[in-house]
Image (cartoon, grey):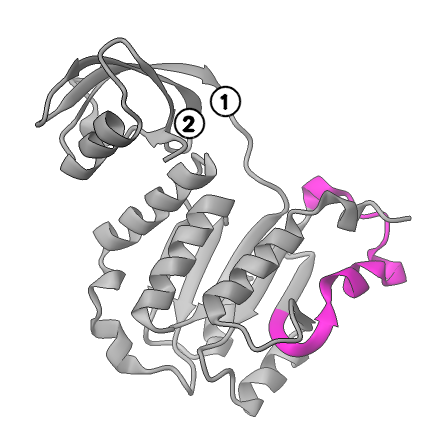
Amino acid sequence: MNLLICKEEWRIAGSNRFRIVDPIKIKHISEILRKQIGDRLRAGIVDQSFGQFRIEELSLKEIVGTYKPILTPKRRIPEVHLLLAVNRPPTVRKILELAGTWGVCEIQFFLTKNSRRDYLTSPVWKSEEIEKELLEGMEQGKNVFLPKVALDSENRPETVFLEKTKDRKFRFLFLLDRKGKTISRIFEEPYNRNLEYSENRILVAIGPESGFVKKEIDFWKDSGFESVTVSSRVLRTETAVAFLLSRLEEESLFLKS
């Protein structure tokens, strides 16, 4: 844990004091981090600020302390949105944690032809489980911006895409595909040079483990999505997402002349 996210439900009577009763969190702070009364932790409030948490009371059952805001952070750029087909629950958990670590803006899960509906019975889709995975990633990556997550288990990919782009525009539409172009090659295209790094909004479509069917691939491409690859190897979905995000945070991609 590189950052303690102070949850609103921990706040004591509208003050800057927080009470932690999560036994896993208490054990980590007292035994792994070896913090004691009077010590400070890097901390943050979701979507608000970075600061410090000073421990005032510490026991096996609770930790009480005061949070002091220090700075107001900015969202990570470029702004990344994921259209992600329903995958195996363990894969979903890993991607949620990655999204929290990196600072993905939004994830929209949806069903495709090859998606397995029985995955929807997993507890991973419960709001508390989603938040748990996101917060673990946020504390790892020192990110205070909580990604927005939604699941559409009724509509086809075409409808999901239209709803996603109804009120916003994306500078780049990517389809994750092992046979696609590399991200570097795409950004070297003449029409993509000298882009302003801070003003790019990127939407990435990612299929299930077995991939999109041809009709779905044709739809994405007809809708303006460009196939991108992050490796010549066959990667697990969560690994491919991690590779993709690591490439997209390279500012040099946007500054080539």
Q: Which residues are magenta?
A: 175-199
Residue 146 figure quarter: top left
Mark 1: few, some, or many residues within 10 Å (few <14, many ≥20)?
some
Query: Height in image: 75 above or below 192?
Result: above
Q: Is residue 209 above or below residue 150?
A: below
Q: Nearer the viewer, residue 42 or 188?
A: 42
Q: Pointer 2: what residue?
A: 48
Residue 109 spot, x, y in % from top left? 40, 66
Q: Residue at (23%, 29%) from the top-left corner?
A: 31
Pick whichever, 115 or 232, lies toward us: 232
Question: Residue 107 location in percent, x, y?
Answer: 44, 58
Spatial CA span between label 2 and label 1: 6 Å
Dot 1 lies on which element? loop
Residue picked out by circle 1:
72
| Residue found at the very far left of the displayed protein | 61
Residue at 22% over, 11% down: 37
Residue at image location 19% in from the left, 38% down from the top:
24
Tell me the quadrant of the picture where the N terminus can be found.
Answer: top left
In the visual, does 127 lie left or right of 158? Answer: left
Q: Residue at x 46, y 15 (%)?
A: 70
Question: Marks 1 and 2: in contact by CB < 8 Å?
Answer: yes
One can see residue 123 in this view: yes
Name which residue type carries label 2.
Answer: Gln
Instruction: Based on the picture, tell me whether residue 47 belongs to the magenta stretch.
Output: no
Which of marks 1 and 2 precedes in the sequence?
2
Tag 2 secondary structure = loop
